[in-house]
Image: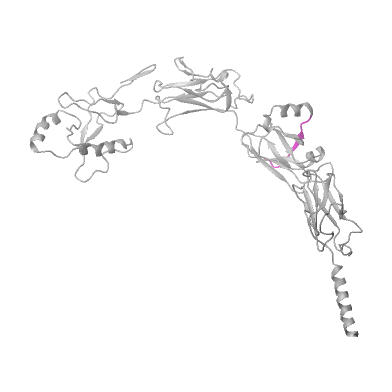
């Protein structure tokens, strides 16, 4: 009997030792975290009876600016649901009740205080948006935040880094009527919800330069909770307001081809009311005006002057007084802008991709020739198979009087391969290229009875 009692005592002591190890196995979230809507605690042993848990007292006291509701999920899991997502700049502390005990009456052991923070206020969105590449040199930035931020901490810890500038540029806060006017000018889908701030650099940005808005560590909310790391938004300023002439050229060093449009390209939009007054002025005083946009528009990014132009003519670009872009900027350079046309380019052009010649008439195939050398060479090749000698003899006289190839098509299979070759021909490659051995074309001289061609220009028309 004594031995049995001894064993029972050992069992009871062991059970009591195990029952004393009641702890919080997991509490989430902790530390700095965004966003937060709920906190939970998992205990190592049952804390409440299974069943209806609505009247059970919460295990923690909660010190947090945003209220919430306590509930037991099960006998070991407790949850605290906040009434709304916690904004930035808050700190919430959960402290276990001094009398908290497990279902069997053992007190809580181990850690009893847990803390979470939503961190300092950070930027949720910006206007202009992160990555914008054409911001103004004096751009104001509308920053939507995930929590209130104090003006003092913004001025102290936010700024701009500019490529090529060694020191960080500080920020100024835009407030009052100026801030309201900036926000009122935004489209409705870009208007920020509170809280937000409007900031601007303390000096003008250089053109065409990378800019970095740094929302630095230390920006704090009214509670004193501050950011612990930098947040960066990247931008690039727009180029200077300039005008550039563009046209087609035979090569990079050549002047403008007189048969294609001349364009003036603005680096920033210009009102059509101003742009329509831009003219090209020739040395003899003749003035050319640009075409109107294909679709009505208040602002345009380029102007187009239609061809043809007289060859080897220099034009001066005449701009209206006070020309400005959409931001009110004047041209970065006041130097005169000119453009010159080149001589007409050489041309040998048939009226169509193929032609039909009548067998019993004086056959002729028209070709337009311009600025070709007198000894320009061409090629010809018979496209049909050899016919019996009698037929070849009858056609010989006709061939002798032609400067091109002529044939009588009797079977479709004789001409279809050549039509397919013709349909895919390109100017950079002869359609006679890649022919089978023994089918090389015969070279002949392209006649120009009047010698080298001369050009005659008249408005809206060109002729040889």
Between 243 and 179, which is closer to the camera in this rendering? 179
Residue drawn at 84 percent across, 70 percent down: 18
User: In the rendered view, how is the structure colored?
Assistant: one colour
The number of numbered discs placed on residues in the rendered structure image is: 0
Q: Position of residue 90 (x, y in %)?
A: 82, 46
Q: Is residue 383 above or below residue 451?
A: below
- Farthest residue, direction left: 390
Q: Is residue 105 above or below residue 322?
A: below
Q: Position of residue 462 (x, y in %)?
A: 35, 20
Residue 167 visible in the displayed image: no
Residue drawn at 17 percent across, 29 percent down: 402
Instruction: Say left or right for 323 vs 227.
Output: left
* Magenta residues, start to end: 165-175
Residue drawn at 20 percent across, 38 percent down: 414
Q: Is residue 174 magenta?
A: yes
Between 266 and 416, which is closer to the camera in this rendering? 416
Q: Quadrant of the C terminus?
A: top left
Q: Is residue 411 above or below residue 28?
A: above
Q: Quadrant of the N terminus?
A: bottom right
The quarter of the displayed image where residue 453 is located:
top left
The quarter of the displayed image where residue 325 is located:
top right
Between 264 and 229, which is closer to the camera in this rendering? 229
Q: Position of residue 88 (x, y in %)?
A: 78, 44
């Amino acid at each position: 009997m004594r031995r049995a009692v001894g064993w029972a005592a050992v069992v009871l002591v062991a059970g009591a030792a195990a029952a004393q190890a009641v702890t919080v196995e997991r509490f989430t979230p902790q530390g700095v975290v965004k966003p937060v809507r709920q906190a939970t605690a998992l205990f190592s042993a049952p804390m409440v009876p299974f069943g209806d848990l609505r009247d059970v007292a919460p295990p923690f006291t909660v010190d947090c600016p945003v209220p919430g509701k306590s509930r037991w999920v099960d006998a070991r899991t407790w949850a605290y649901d906040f009434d709304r997502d916690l904004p930035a700049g808050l700190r919430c502390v959960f402290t276990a009740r001094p009398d908290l005990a497990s279902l069997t009456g053992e007190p809580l052991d181990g850690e009893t205080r847990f803390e979470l923070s939503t961190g300092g206020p950070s930027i949720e969105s910006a206007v202009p948006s992160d990555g914008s590449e054409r911001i103004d040199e004096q751009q104001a930035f509308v920053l939507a935040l995930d929590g209130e931020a104090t003006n003092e901490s913004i001025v102290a810890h936010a700024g701009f880094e500019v490529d090529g500038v060694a020191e960080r540029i500080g920020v100024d806060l835009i407030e009052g009527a100026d801030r309201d006017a900036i926000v009122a000018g935004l489209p409705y889908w870009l208007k920020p919800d509170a809280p937000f701030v409007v900031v601007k650099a303390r000096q003008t940005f250089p053109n065409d330069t990378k800019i970095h808005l740094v929302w630095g560590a230390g920006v704090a909310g009214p509670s004193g909770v501050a950011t612990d790391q930098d947040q960066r938004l990247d931008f690039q300023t727009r180029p200077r307001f300039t005008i550039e002439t563009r046209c087609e050229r035979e090569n990079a060093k050549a002047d403008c081809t007189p048969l294609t449009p001349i364009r003036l390209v603005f680096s920033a939009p210009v009102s059509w009311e101003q742009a329509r007054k831009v003219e090209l002025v020739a040395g003899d005083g003749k003035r050319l005006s640009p075409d109107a946009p294909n679709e009505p528009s208040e602002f345009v990014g380029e102007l187009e002057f239609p061809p043809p132009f007289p060859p080897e003519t220099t034009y001066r670009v005449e701009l209206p007084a006070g020309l400005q872009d959409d931001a009110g900027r004047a041209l970065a350079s006041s130097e005169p802008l000119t453009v010159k046309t080149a001589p007409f380019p050489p041309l040998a052009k048939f009226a169509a991709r193929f032609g039909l010649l009548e067998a019993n008439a004086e056959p002729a195939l028209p070709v337009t020739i311009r600025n070709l050398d007198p000894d320009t060479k061409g090629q010809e090749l018979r496209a049909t198979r050899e016919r019996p000698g009698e037929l070849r003899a009858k056609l010989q006289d006709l061939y002798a009087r032609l400067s091109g190839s002529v044939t009588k098509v009797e079977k479709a299979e004789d001409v279809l391969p050549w039509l397919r070759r013709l349909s895919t021909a390109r100017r950079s490659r002869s359609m006679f290229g890649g022919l089978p051995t023994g089918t090389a074309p015969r070279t002949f001289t392209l006649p120009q009875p009047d010698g080298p061609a001369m050009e005659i220009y008249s408005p809206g028309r060109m002729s040889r």
